[in-house]
Amino acid sequence: MSDRPNAVALAATLAGVAVFKYTCLVWMSNKYRTRPFEKVGTISELYVFPTKSLGGLRVDSADCTPTGLTFQGVTDRHWAVAASTGVYVTQRQIPKMALISTSLQGDTMLLDAPGMSSLIIPIHPKQGPKTWVSKIKIKEEWSTSLDLGDEAASWMDKFLGKTGLRVHFSSPEMDKRDASNVTKLWKHNAKKGDTLAFSDYCGYMLMTSASLNELNKRLAEPVTMLNFRANIVVDECPAFDEDDWDEVKIGKATFRNIDACTRCILVTVDPFKGEKSKDEEPLTTLKKFRLKPPYGPKPCLGIHLAMDHNDTIHTGDVVYARRKRN
């Protein structure tokens, strides 16, 4: 008989613990599920960079697609230059690439550079006698591509002072890379289906103008947003506020923050001179105040985004963000 009250008390205690745990789980779930979107700023600049590491297009509006911003049928970083080995090249290796400008004319894209006639490239190139299916290596992944032929290759060789360069295009029907397969030394938040063409890691990069301004306060010679090649620039928010954004909403378009944007030697290329800075600025200064675990010696500036819902976005659009969980 003496054991019965103890058993009843134990059962009551266990039931109480179970109820408490359930209540806590419900509370935590509701707390995280109901994290509100809040207004964080407005879009001040939009950029589409059709060819990786070449000059881009500053636009007033663009369509959000899974692989990046699209303007007049041209999608961000769907063209790229590669060596004869198929390995992609950028301003890291050839800073002079920054001097090649891009414009659109009807169904063609024009590449222009000092001392060169325009290179005319179809916006929707097809496989034919002068173009063929090839392969290009972006980071550690090989992708199927369309080689745009000898005329484009010769143009690149002549202006950049190289031999064996090829121009590649990621046709709509060709398989795209998946950001979830990208190998990094730290955990990232890309999901299966976060697709990209020739971008390093994702379809979108966002920065705030305040972050650039804060960096420039520390530099003897200010730099511009073109050094960082952001797609979406947000104004009217504090410097580095974007670090804390978990999700971003612009109109009906929604995005997930899948990683911080780590910076490399490419940001030292002057976009107007096509030369690397001798003192490795602004990278040197960034390393003094923007190193964050777990990124080691790579400073962070801006965030990588993956799109979940599409829409057309415009300069002046209000930007909303759902902040990271504390």
Image (cartoon, rainbow, N blue to C red):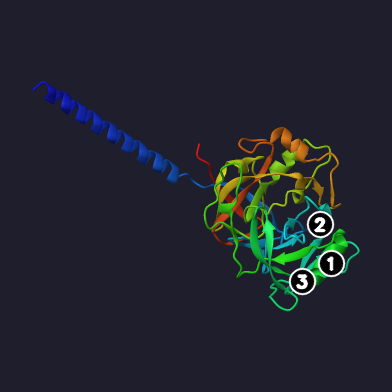
Q: Nearer the viewer, residue 77 or 151?
A: 151
User: Amino acid under label 1?
Assistant: Trp
Cα–Cα span, label 2 and label 3? 19 Å
Q: Is residue 68 left or right of residue 281?
A: left
Q: Nearer the viewer, residue 237 or 286?
A: 286
Q: How many marks?
A: 3
Question: What's the residue at 84%, 44% (across, down)?
Answer: 277
The residue wearing badge 1 is 155
Q: Taking 106 as reference, is 71 above or below it? A: above
Q: Is residue 318 visible?
A: yes
Q: Are marks 2 and 1 in contact (CB under 8 Å)?
A: no
User: Amino acid under label 2?
Assistant: Met
Give how far across and how far down residue 147 sits, in percent.
Answer: 72, 69
Q: Residues within 10 Å of mark 1 (few under 14, many from 20)?
A: many
The residue wearing badge 3 is 149
Judged from the image, the secondary structure of the residue bearing numbered disc 1 is helix
Question: What's the residue at 63%, 52% (across, down)?
Answer: 201
Cα–Cα span, label 1 and label 3? 11 Å
- Closer to the chain start, of discs 2 and 3, is 2
Quadrant location of residue 127?
A: bottom right
Quadrant location of residue 213?
A: top right
Q: Taking 82 as reference, is 225 above or below it? A: above
Judged from the image, the secondary structure of the residue bearing numbered disc 2 is helix
The residue wearing badge 2 is 97
Judged from the image, the secondary structure of the residue bearing numbered disc 3 is loop
Q: Is residue 257 left or right of residue 12?
A: right
Q: Is residue 249 visible?
A: no
Give how far across and how far down residue 194 sits, in percent.
Answer: 56, 56
Q: Which of the two marks, 2 or 3, is nearer to us in this view?
A: 3
